[in-house]
Image: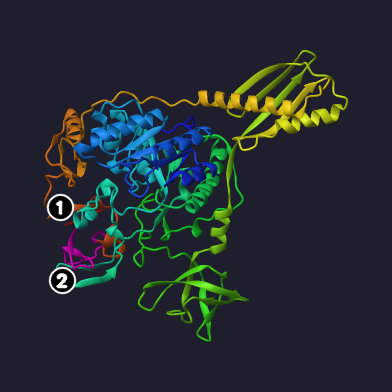
Amino acid sequence: MYSSKKPIELLAPAKDKKCAFAAINCGADAIYIGAIDFGARKNACNSLEDLKEVINYAHKFNVKVFVTLNTILFDNELKNAKKLIEKLYELNTDAIIIQDMGILELDIPPINLHASTQCNNSNIQKIKFLEEIGFQRAILARELSIEQIKNISAQTNIELEAFIHGALCVSYSGQCYLSYAIGGRSANRGECAQPCRKPYSLIDGEGKKIIDKTHLLCLKDLNVSDYLEEMILAGVTSFKIEGRLKDENYIKNTVSFYREKIDNILIKHNLKRSSQGVSIKDFVPNLNKTFNRGFCSYFLKGRNTNITSFLSPKNIGELVGTVKNIYKNTSFTLCNGELNQNDGITFFDKDNNLCGTKIEKSINGIYTPTSLKNIAQGTKIYKNIDYKFIKKLEKSLPTRKIPITIDVKINEEHIQIKIKDFYDNDLNINIPNQFEKAENQIKATENIKKQLSKTGDTEFIVTDINFEATTIPFIQINKINEIRRKIIQDFQEIRQKNYKIKKQPQINYPQIYNKMLDYKYNITNELAKKFYEKCGAKIIEYGLEHPTQKNFKDKTVMTTKHCIRYSLNLCSKNGKKIKEPLYLIDETGKKYKLKFDCKNCIMEIKF
């Protein structure tokens, strides 16, 4: 259950080394990043050399590094997965994020294990099962409400990690097979083609078209920044930003924003963050200026209608204003709002298609776009590229520093220097006082303070130097610098030694809550099958990606809490009658049957 003793963690994504450093410098307490393979993002892989550099830098600030190995594996991949895990352990990786339980049957070193959201961690039975196995952390399903999270926290002691920002998968994670069924690109293997972002038509059981060519499965992006305090009190200790495919600007902006929000809550409740150091940056974060499809809180506060982005899966941007006048078929003015040269704008045409163009000129409130096509008087204009803000982010070089103080005590025999941070690390050194008395006592004191304060590009920043001396010796500047370099190096080594990584406890085989496991448990190798059998289960069907699975007909290829009937105000609980079954039809004419579990408010898509 939630305890104030547990530190709170802001967890950021990193596509590559550059993004990882940006996340750390902007204040992340932990990052998650892909390795060379098995990371569920084919376009976000990193070499072991880069990971080593990231880990070494992160640990300077007690920032943890979690590596994603959360794809399901085939039998011929297990050997390479084992080798990779062994190498990650040697690099001092803090934990690996996994989905495939076959990994638990490998003879791997005691590296910490986090259960990926791909494990479909959506109920108390599953979370308890993971805890009993020995997982250190469970990454919660995005669909859970605060009340459900509170209930899970009250009945378990496992660390709970929850998403707070970024793109939403419309399906329960790990339960989407639509991309694989359509074109062989498996979401569970990191190759999702995102069919949920495509347009569909909806027809009823009599063939009547209810809605035509609309993005019926497309969701807005998640933003629960208004509910962080409630989530902390509910028991969440790790707050996860989505976006391992996003660029450095996205990382800088989102991490900085949530760092400020979380810090204010920590101060209010006298809580601690899990990492160390202060971030120094020169911009004001603004989530509205980074790619998003509009924001929603999903089901965190219960079911609501404000979760869909039916009109477009693209970044519409911020509403700026409405077109007031058109000039010479080349320019326009706005009733309100302001645009700048090089801004990107979007708008909807008369058929509700999203269009976009660029502002080439901005002079005294008259805006000349690259193209004026489909822009008319009364058109609502959105800004999806804020040129000035993007340039500000690109030029920004945020840094992160560990504040330290230095105490200098001088007597006739010794010079004692003590360096300490605010995290219970300290170092004392004694130097024989073989120096002559300085003729200018004030200048000598200033020189010592000035040179000891020059920490350069190290992770430290000196906030205070205290002197206790009756007589100040004359010490040459190069000698002071030599002393400073030595104590900084020794202090770095002490901090490094004091950084501890917990060992993964022994793996257990608790009795599983479900004894008959079908394809939805994503078992694609014999070791995963062996693991579940040890937990008392019978495997009645391999995962859909397994070579033995040839036919997807009538299979549920998506399970989602998003209900099309509810979003279209056709919910049966509200007395709305409609001729079932309903079908989605994609751009190729392929039909998908919809099944509604109204008792549990869940929708399934059949292939």
Whether residue 114 is situated above or below residue 378 in the rendered picture: above
The structure residue drawn at horizontal position 51% and vertical position 41%, both measured from the top left corner, is 24
Are discs 2 and 1 less than 8 Å apart at CB? Answer: no
Q: Amino acid at mark 2?
A: Gly
Quadrant of the image for the N terminus? top left
Residue 238 in view of the camera: no
| Residue 521 percent location from the top left of the image | 21, 41
- Left or right: residue 472 compared with residue 464: right
Nearest to N terminus: mark 2 or mark 1: 2
The structure residue drawn at horizontal position 18% and vertical position 61%, both measured from the top left corner, is 592
Which of the two discs, 2 and 1, sits closer to the camera?
A: 1
| Residue 484 percent location from the top left of the image | 68, 27
Residue at the extreme top of the image, as rendered: 413
Q: Which mark is residue 207?
A: 2
Numbered circles on residues, count: 2
Quadrant of the image for the C terminus? bottom left
Q: Amino acid at mark 1?
A: Lys
For disc 1, the neighbor class at 10 Å (few under 14, some 14 to 19, many from 20) is some
| Residue 286 percent location from the top left of the image | 53, 56
The secondary element bearing badge 2 is classed as loop
Whether residue 508 is situated above or below residue 462 in the rendered picture: above
| Residue 67 percent location from the top left of the image | 38, 38
State which region is magenta: 572-598
For disc 2, the neighbor class at 10 Å (few under 14, some 14 to 19, many from 20) is few
The structure residue drawn at horizontal position 73% and vertical position 25%, both measured from the top left corner, is 479
Q: Which mark is residue 555?
A: 1
